Image (cartoon, rainbow, N blue to C red):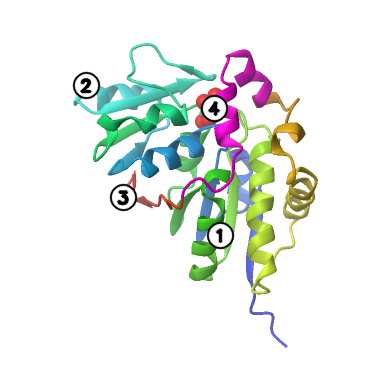
Amino acid sequence: MDDTRKHIEVCFTPGEYEYFKDEYEIVVVIDVLRATSAICSAFNNGVSALIPVPTIEEAREYQAKGYLVGAERKGQIVDGFDFGNSPYSYMKEELKGQEVVLSTTNGTKAINIAKDADTVVIGALSNLDALCAWLIEQNKNVLCLCSGWQDKFNLEDTICAGAIMEQLIATGNYTSDEDSSIAAKYLYLSAKDNYMGYLKSSSHRRRLKNLNLNEDIKYCLTPNQTDVIPILKNGKLV
Ligand code: 3SL
C-alpha cells in the first residue's frame, strides 16, 4: 500500500537548508529566543504587517522612509533604532495597525533564506497549538527551519520543532525519517515538562540572561499565549 502520509522534518540550521529546501511546501521558521516569539507578540498586539529584513543597511533604508524599525544584533538594540527584539517592545499601543520592520541576528536571516518556499510561516512556543492546528489543516509537507545561532545548532529552536512534530505525527497523517527530526523529538520529550530548567545552561539563554533579559526568556518559553499565524506574502509577514 502507498504511504500517502506527508512529511514533517527538522533542519537544525539555516546553513543546512539548501539540503532540504526543494521537498517541502511549507517552511516553519523558528527562533524561540527571541525573533519569532517577538513577531508573534507583534501580531498578537495588532500590527498590520511586519517586514523582516536580513541586514542593518536595509533596516536603515526603511527607517529613512519613515517606518518604525526594530533592529537587534547579539541580543542588543542596534543604536539609532526604535526598538529591538523583545516581545514586550511589540505590545505597545502605538504599534497597533502599523506596518513595522525588523532585522535580527538569526531569525530574520532564516526567514529570508526560506523566502522562495511555497509558504513560509512563523513558529514559536507562544503560538504552538494554533500553528499545529493550522499546519494539520493544510495537509502539506512541512519543514521546521531552526534559526540557530550564527549557523550553529541551538536547543530551544530544536525543542520547539520537536513539539510541532509531536503534534503532527500524532494525527497519523504525517511521518518523518530524517535523523535531525528524530533527535528533535527526543529533545522535546526530555524538555517538555520544564523548558526553563532544561534550557538553563543553553548558550542563548545564558547570553540573554547576562543582558538581564530574564523576563523575555520566560515569555518566549511559555507555550500558547496567542493564536496568530504570521505568513510571509510578497516579502511581508501578514
Ligand atoms: O537571532 C535572532 O534573530 C534573535 O532572536 C537573537 S536575540 O534573542 O534577540 O538575541
Report the magenta residues as a range: 205-226
Indicate the quadrant where residue 42 lies: top left
- Measured as percent of width and height from the top left, residue 225 is found at 51, 45
Please give left or right for residue 154 compared with residue 38 in the image: right
Q: Earlier in the sequence, mark 1 or mark 4?
A: 1
Inspect the magenta stretch and tell me whether residue 223 lies in it. Answer: yes
Confirm or reject: label 2 Cβ below 8 Å from ligand 1. Answer: no
Q: Is residue 204 above or below residue 111?
A: above
Q: Nearer the viewer, mark 2 or mark 1?
A: 1
Q: CA distance from mark 4 to mark 3?
A: 30 Å
Confirm or reject: label 4 Cβ below 8 Å from ligand 1. Answer: yes
Please give left or right for residue 100 compared with residue 183 in the image: left
Q: Is residue 41 above or below residue 114?
A: above
Label 1 sits on what residue type?
Cys
Q: CA distance from mark 2 to mark 3?
A: 21 Å
Q: Write the residue at 53% across / 44% down.
A: 126
- In contact (CB < 8 Å): disc 1 and disc 3: no
Label 2 sits on what residue type?
Ala
- In contact (CB < 8 Å): disc 2 and disc 4: no
Which mark, residue 132?
1
Q: Which residue is mark 2?
A: 64
Please give left or right for residue 159 compared with residue 230 in the image: right
Q: Write the residue at 50% across / 59% down.
A: 26
Label 3 sits on what residue type?
Asn
Q: Earlier in the sequence, mark 2 or mark 3?
A: 2
Q: Nearer the viewer, mark 1 or mark 3?
A: 1
Which mark, residue 234?
3
Q: Which residue is mark 4?
A: 216
